[in-house]
Image (cartoon, rainbow, N blue to C red):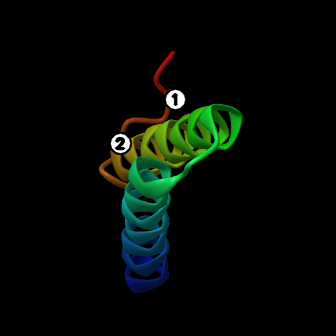
Amino acid sequence: MADETHRHIRQLRAQAHKLAADAEHAANAAERTRLQDRAQQLESDSDQESMMAAGDIYPAQ
């Protein structure tokens, strides 16, 4: 189970990194903002899962 969790966290971070890179190249300001927001949400999700996997039962606020 821990391996699955770590793999999922890595996937979330990889997706966030890709979206952030895509945002840098987006020509449309609205699309850039949407991609940046989604990347930030995925980073936050990965941080939260990482903390929970480390034994912190309460998600970050």
Label tally: 2
Residue 45 falls left or right of residue 7: right
Count neighbours of disc 1 (C-alpha within 10 A) and say few if under 14, some if 14 to 19, many if 20 or more.
few
Q: Which residue shows up at 46% across the image and 23% down it?
A: 60
Give the mark nearer the N terminus: 1 vs 2.
2
Indicate the amino acid at tag 1. Pro
Residue 54 falls left or right of residue 14: left
For this rendering, which residue is in front, 7 or 21?
21
Count neighbours of disc 2 (C-alpha within 10 A) and say few if under 14, some if 14 to 19, many if 20 or more.
some
Image location (x, y in percent) of residue 22: 47, 60
Q: Which residue shows up at 36% across the image and 60% down it?
A: 17
Image location (x, y in percent) of residue 42: 53, 49
Q: Residue furthest left?
A: 54
- Give the answer, above or below, for where 33 lies relative to 23: above
Kindly identify which numbered label has been placed on residue 59.
Answer: 1
For this rendering, which residue is in front, 28 or 41?
28
Q: Is the Cβ of the residue at disc 1 closer than 8 Å to that at disc 2?
A: yes
Image location (x, y in percent) of residue 35: 59, 46
Kindly identify which numbered label has been placed on residue 6.
Answer: none
Indicate the amino acid at tag 2. Met
Q: Which residue shows up at 59% across the image and 32% down it?
A: 33
SS class of the residue under badge 2? helix
Alpha carbon separation for disc pair 1 and 2:
7 Å
For this rendering, which residue is in front, 56 or 6?
6
Q: Which residue shows up at 50% across the image and 47% down it?
A: 39
SS class of the residue under badge 1? loop
Q: Which residue is mark 2?
A: 51
For this rendering, which residue is in front, 18 or 6?
18
